[in-house]
Image: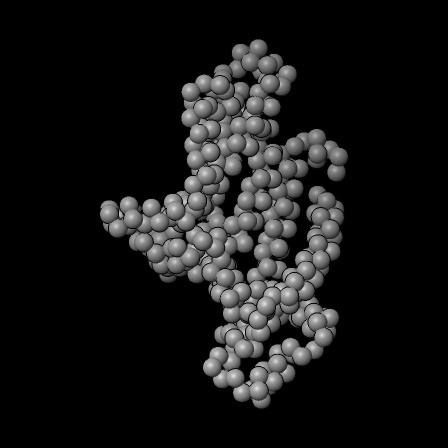
């Protein structure tokens, strides 16, 4: 297993390098001048030139990239052009918020999508299957921003059950934190549940038609044991891979959902950075997101091997 993980990490290094090149290069093609955004109303040429010299914006792009990459390797992601704070500090501040939202969203997604997928597969071509498919299609079709606004109007404005927006750290006030996160997590989890339901159903249908499942039934095992102990364990493998990708997407920041519920996570951070031409923040967030995707895929690969004895034998 250590050799397997080491090989995956070696593949990840050139991937991160390529991503860094694309992020740094393509961002320079964006219209606008970050120095003008920083200066605001003060457009004194001397001040503008001083800012460009301070942040090395007059250097050739390859020189800027090498300097930035050297800092990244040492754990220095640069300084925010807008707030003059270290980018790493901003990421440390926003990342726990996004991780909490992602985890709660995946809990909702699993609680809704996986049981529905199993039920739809077991009851194939019945009313339950059609209802589950209809709900999955609805989850994919309903825009997150519309569902979020409707939940705020119903749950917060009309019923007064939960706060409409805002955020409280789980380390400061756990109850208040969960209250502020339930609705945005449900909005995101609802869409992910639809995707998980369809993949779980497809995987379960493939497993339920296998010879060893027919053998298990012939031995007299109960339907529950056949479905949960034999079928679901093998159908879980592709679902794990999908879950890693979905969790990686959540780590990138749910921009619209975070904006609607005023959650200070990665989504809001990167939107503000793009509008303000805050290059260092955009680069830092994208690299952190790419690293998150790679780590989630690595975890999925490890779990895949642990759950599949045939793969463990080939290591």
Q: Position of residue 91 (x, y in %)?
A: 53, 64
Q: Nearer the viewer, residue 23 or 87?
A: 23
Determine the image quadrant of residue 299.
top right
Q: Position of residue 266 (x, y in %)?
A: 50, 59
Going by the picture, which residue comes out furthest to the front?
31
Q: Position of residue 128 (x, y in %)?
A: 43, 22
Q: Residue at x 52, y 32 (%)?
A: 198
Q: Nearer the viewer, residue 249 or 225?
A: 249
Viewer can see residue 20: no
From this view, report whether residue 291 is shown above or below residue 186.
below
Residue 5 located left or right of residue 200: right
Q: Residue at x 38, y 45 (%)?
A: 147
In the rendered image, the quadrant that contains the C terminus is top right
Viewer can see residue 141: yes
Q: Residue at x 50, y 33 (%)?
A: 197
From this view, report whether residue 184 is shown above or below residue 191.
below
From this view, report whether residue 246 is shown above or below residue 35.
above
Determine the image quadrant of residue 209.
top right
In the rendered image, the quadrant that contains the N terminus is top right
Residue 158 located left or right of residue 118: left
Give the colour scheme of this rendering.
one colour
From this view, report whether residue 62 is shown above or below residue 95.
below
Q: Position of residue 23 (x, y in %)?
A: 65, 61
Q: Residue at x 52, y 62 (%)?
A: 270
Going by the picture, which residue comes out furthest to the bottom?
46
> How many numbered badges does the structure rendering display?
0
């Amino acid at each position: 297993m250590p050799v397997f993980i080491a090989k995956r990490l070696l593949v990840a290094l050139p991937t991160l390098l390529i991503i860094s090149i694309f992020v740094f290069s393509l961002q320079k093609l964006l219209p606008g001048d970050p120095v003008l955004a920083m200066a605001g109303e003060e457009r004194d040429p001397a001040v503008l030139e001083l800012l460009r010299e301070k942040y090395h914006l007059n250097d050739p792009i390859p020189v800027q990239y090498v300097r930035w990459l050297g800092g990244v390797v040492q754990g220095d992601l640069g300084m925010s052009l807008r707030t003059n704070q270290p980018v790493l500090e901003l990421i440390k501040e926003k990342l726990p918020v996004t991780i909490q939202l992602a985890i709660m969203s995946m809990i909702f997604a699993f609680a809704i999508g996986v049981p529905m997928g199993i039920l739809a597969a077991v009851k194939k071509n019945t009313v339950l299957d059609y209802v589950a498919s209809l709900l999955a299609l609805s989850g994919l079709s309903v825009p997150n921003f519309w569902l979020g606004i409707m939940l705020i109007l119903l749950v917060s404005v009309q019923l007064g059950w939960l706060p409409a927006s805002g955020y409280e750290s789980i380390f400061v006030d756990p109850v208040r934190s969960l209250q502020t996160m339930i609705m945005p997590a449900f909005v995101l989890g609802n869409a992910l549940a639809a995707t998980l339901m369809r993949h779980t159903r497809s995987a379960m249908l493939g497993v339920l038609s296998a010879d060893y499942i027919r053998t298990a039934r012939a031995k007299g095992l109960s339907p529950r044991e056949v479905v949960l102990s034999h079928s679901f364990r093998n159908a879980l493998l592709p679902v794990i891979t999908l879950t890693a990708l979905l969790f990686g997407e959540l780590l990138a920041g749910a921009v619209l959902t975070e904006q609607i519920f005023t959650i200070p996570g990665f989504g809001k951070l990167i939107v503000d950075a793009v509008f303000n031409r805050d290059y260092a923040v955009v680069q830092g967030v994208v690299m952190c997101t790419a690293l998150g995707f790679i780590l989630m895929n690595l975890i999925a690969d490890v779990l895949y091997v642990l759950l599949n004895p045939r793969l463990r034998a080939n290591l």
